[in-house]
Amino acid sequence: RIHVAVLVNDMVQDGEAAPRPKEELQTLENLITAAIGYDRERGDVVTIESMAFSTYEPAGEEVVKQGVADFLRAHLMQILQLVIPALVSLILALFVLKPILTSTAPAKQAPALAPGPANPQLAAPQAAAVAPPETPEDQLTRVVTQKMDASRAVLSDWASETGGAA
């Protein structure tokens, strides 16, 4: 068996509550019986009543728009509880952690020294301009031109040993 009770608010006309018309209540009853699968033989009951619901006036205070100064005055301690630890953390990071982290960082490479002596009194005495080293061919040419007679003798001995075939 199914028992359904429905309470419907009265209609408001000209500021006065008036019960809903019987035709509207009958339409609602037909809608409800179709929705629940109403069966009279089973003993199902559907009751619909129209009644004025109580109206309540909103309780409490009227909301007044507050400015920034009013908000700060009301929440000053909560704001300070957030700001002070943040400032302490910032100071700790700047003056304690930053030097520790920068000291463990790899040292920067020193810039290269400028060419020339830093103190002229400590500089080595200037050597005469040194010519680039001679190649073996240049050395041979120089020796042959300086010792022409000895060079001819060596070449003629060498030519006679090889049988004159050059």
Image (cartoon, helix red, strand yellow):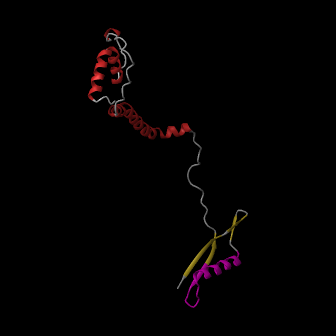
* Stretch of the chain drawn in magenta: 21-47
- Residue at image location 39% in from the left, 36% down from the top: 89
Query: Residue 165 at what x, y percent from top left?
Result: 32, 30
- Residue toward you, 79 or 106: 106
- Rendered-image quadrant of the C terminus: top left
Residue 48 left/right relative to 141:
right
Q: Please identify the residue farthest to the right as the structure is shown.
A: 14
Q: How many marks?
A: 0
The answer to whether residue 133 shows anywhere in this view is no
Magenta-span inclusion, residue 35: yes
Eyeballing the image, is 54 above or below 27? above
- Residue at image location 61% in from the left, 79% down from the top: 32
> In which image quadrant can residue 164 be found?
top left
> In which image quadrant can residue 115 be found?
top left
Eyeballing the image, is 20 above or below 121? below
Eyeballing the image, is 53 above or below 64? below
> In which image quadrant can residue 121 be found?
top left
The answer to whether residue 156 shows anywhere in this view is yes
- Residue toward you, 141 or 69: 141
Q: Please identify the residue farthest to the bottom as the structure is shown.
A: 41
- Residue toward you, 144 or 83: 144
- Residue at image location 33% in from the left, 18% down from the top: 144
Eyeballing the image, is 82 above or below 42? above
Magenta-span inclusion, residue 22: yes
- Residue toward you, 119 or 139: 139
Residue 70 left/right relative to 103:
right
Query: Residue 52 at what x, y percent from top left?
Result: 63, 68
